[in-house]
Each structure stands twice: as C-alpha cells, then as structure tokens.
Image (tube, rainbow, N blue to C red):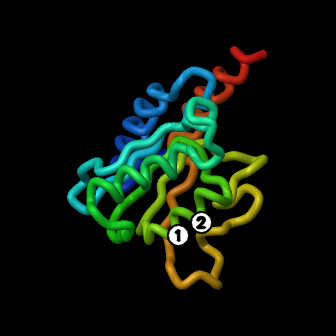
Amino acid sequence: MLQPLTSVEKRAQRRMREAMKQAMHTPAGDVPVGALVYNTAGKVVGRGVNRREANGDPTAHAEVEALRDAAATLGTWRLDGCELVVTLEPCTMCAGAILGARIDSLVFGAWEPKTGAVGSLFDALRDPHHLHRVQVRAGVLAEENARILSDFFARLR
C-alpha cells in the first residue's frame, strides 16, 4: 500500500514542477534543464536554464545560472538557507558550485548516469571530506523529467 506523501515531499514536488516549467524557457538547441533557488521564506530568488549553446559558454548550466541570479538578487555569494531545485542531477562542476555557494539543500529530478555527480557516478555533495553539508532529495518526479530530456534528444535524431 502506498503511503501518503509527507509535507516535505509535497513541497519538493511542487517546487520541481516549477523547475520543469522553468526548463521550458531553455533556448532552442540547449538541453532543457531548469533550476530555481528558493530562500528560507519559500520565495524564488534565482532562476536558470541551460545556455551553453546559446551563450557559447561551457559553464552556462542551469544550476550555475540560477546560483548567479540568486547571488545577484540577495547581494551575496553565500546562499545559506537556500534550496536549489533542478530537473537533472548536477554534474561535477555544478556540484562544486553548489558547495561553494553554501546551498543548504538540493532537490533534483532525473538521474544523469553519464555525468551525474550526486549519486550516479559518485557523490560529490555528500563526500565526508567537505566542511559544508548539503541535504539531498534525489529523483523527485524523475520519470517526468527524464521524459522531457528523452523527447528533446529524440527530436535531435
């Protein structure tokens, strides 16, 4: 028998659906990934989508874009108390940016078996050598997020 969702799970799903809407703003040609940063009051303070192709910038991942936007909004690089919600498991670069920004928690959707650094290939965020700890909720609406990505890649073929 399925257990009812907890309030934390419901919030994670609600926020993930917003990140999925954000992914729809990804420029044509870029992989549709959306990211949102929420402050402690539950307000979106940062938004991002993949823009690597559009900007010709290898660091223009949705997570990095959202972290930059949140830092600009809050006027500080320290995003203590904030939660990052992203539709795809972060890569190594993005995991490093999450640690550097001092994000408190990460919620991600689809797993990324080729480049994922939060459980797929290895787990950069929960490595015990780091001084900063990030709470992780993985696989939120994973199938829906994976479908968005598989549809995008099917259109490329």
Task: In this rendered view, identify the residue nearer to me: 99 or 74.
Answer: 74
**Disc 1 and disc 2 in contact, CB within 8 angstroms:** yes
User: Callout 2: helix, strand or loop?
Assistant: helix
Q: Which residue is mark 1?
A: 99
Q: From the viewer's perspective, tell me whether residue 81 is left or right of residue 96.
A: left
Q: Is residue 73 above or below residue 146?
A: below
User: Callout 1: helix, strand or loop?
Assistant: helix
- The amino acid marked with disc number 2 is Gly
Location of residue 97 (image quadrant): bottom right
Q: Position of residue 26 (x, y in %)?
A: 50, 29
Q: Which residue is mark 2?
A: 96
Give the residue at x 57% y 35%.
Answer: 55
Q: Decide if residue 99 is in sight here.
A: yes
Report the Cα–Cα distance between label 1 and label 2. 5 Å
What's the mark number on residue 6?
none
Give the residue at x 44% y 64%.
Answer: 105
Q: Quadrant of the C terminus?
A: top right
Q: Position of residue 15 (x, y in %)?
A: 37, 44
Furthest residue toward left: 41
Q: From the viewer's perspective, tell me whether residue 33 is left or right of residue 69.
A: right
Q: Decide if residue 1 is in sight here.
A: no
- The amino acid marked with disc number 1 is Leu
Give the residue at x 21% y 58%.
Answer: 41
Q: Position of residue 131 (x, y in %)?
A: 54, 84
Q: Number of labelled discs?
A: 2
Q: Position of residue 102 (x, y in %)?
A: 44, 71
- The local crowd at label 2, few if under 14, some if 14 to 19, many if 20 or more residues have their Cα within 10 Å, is some
Q: From the viewer's perspective, tell me whether residue 29 is left or right of residue 133.
A: right
Give the residue at x 37% y 37%.
Answer: 18
Q: From the viewer's perspective, tell me whether residue 67 is left or right of residue 136.
A: left
Q: Is residue 65 above or below residue 103?
A: above
Location of residue 33 (image quadrant): top right
